[in-house]
Image (cartoon, rainbow, N blue to C red):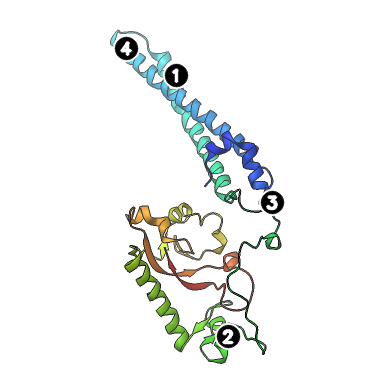
Amino acid sequence: MHDIRFIRDNPEQFDAALARRGLDPVAGAILEIDSKRRGLQARLQEMQSRRNQASKEIGALKSQGGDADALIAEVNDIKQQMPEIEAEENTLAAQLDGRLMELPNLLDDAVPAGDNEDDNELVRTHGSIPGFSFPPRDHVEIGEGLGQMDFALGAKVSGARLVVLRHQLARLERALAAFMLDLHTSKFGYVETMPPYLVNTQTMTGTGQLPKFAEDLYRAGRGHLQGGQRLGQHSHALGLRERPPVGLRVVVQGGRGGGYLQGGQQRLHSHALCLQ
């Protein structure tokens, strides 16, 4: 979530950065909400201070046998007003957090400007594109031809863009996961970790999955099945501040999170990942 202090200090810079993502200016609207909220916070603090002071004055007057009815009425009036103001401040706080959380990250200055992937700059290439004396087949055709990849069965038992792997491909996926886990834990000091697959809304919000990807996430009761967030985003909650976690995750996602609508296994609604 964006830091409201940065927007207060740099509203024009913030809007300019969002413009690079093709978004309209929002700093003015955000700061208007922020200003109203801060005004209510200041008013609440003043009322609390006055209530405390008046309560002390009431005690002093009563100890001297004086009439404290006017002060008592003032304190009661303050007590009646504060819940309404607190509710209004909470509403503005929720609006502010919602606006800040739904905005994308600001681009690094080194990222070239562009409207779509056609404007991407080629930074480097590695190796050479091979040539074939025959029409090459993609992984779907090869996998289905070997009887080890079955999209039709995956769609039948679960839905579109899910696949059943068999035989060597199923073993290969399991072996790759084991290899990556062993590599990171034995060579790079990672702690193998198996957190719950089901997490609460607060966790998903803290890792940036909500509210942006709410439509892409599968729910089970009051929890969410985790998407592709890295375990490192949970490091503090998992008690792993010094040694980073790594684990095998079965990522389940749908909607826009499923990626491009293309054939093959590149972007499926469910896939295994070795996440850090």
Q: In this view, does 87 lie above or below 141?
A: above
Q: Name the residue under label 2.
A: 152
Rendered residue at 47%/61% (across/down):
229
Q: Residue furthest front?
A: 127
Q: Which secondary structure, mark 4? A: helix
The three-letter amino acid code for the residue at tag 3 is Gly
Q: Name the residue under label 3.
A: 22
Is the Cβ of the residue at disc 4 closer than 8 Å to that at disc 1? no
Between disc 4 and disc 1, whose residue precedes?
Answer: 4
CA separation in Å, label 4 and label 2? 83 Å
Q: In this view, does 80 lie above or below 166?
A: above
Q: Which secondary structure, mark 1? A: helix
Nearest the eye: 209 or 132: 132
The three-letter amino acid code for the residue at tag 1 is Glu
Q: In this view, does 139 lie above or below 202?
A: below
The three-letter amino acid code for the residue at tag 2 is Ala
Between disc 1 and disc 3, whose residue precedes?
Answer: 3
Q: In this view, does 65 lie above or below 236?
A: above
CA separation in Å, label 1 and label 3? 52 Å
Q: Which mark is residue 74?
A: 1
Q: Which secondary structure, mark 2? A: helix
Q: Quadrant of the C terminus?
A: bottom left
Is the Cβ of the residue at disc 1 closer than 8 Å to that at disc 3? no
Q: Which secondary structure, mark 3? A: loop
Between disc 3 and disc 4, whose residue precedes?
Answer: 3
Mark 2 or 1, which is nearer the eye? 2
In the image, taking residue 190 as reference, residue 156 lies left or right, namely right
Q: Name the residue under label 4.
A: 60
CA separation in Å, label 3 and label 4? 63 Å
Between disc 4 and disc 2, whose residue precedes?
Answer: 4
Rendered residue at 62%/41% (across/down):
14
Mark 1 or 3, which is nearer the eye? 3
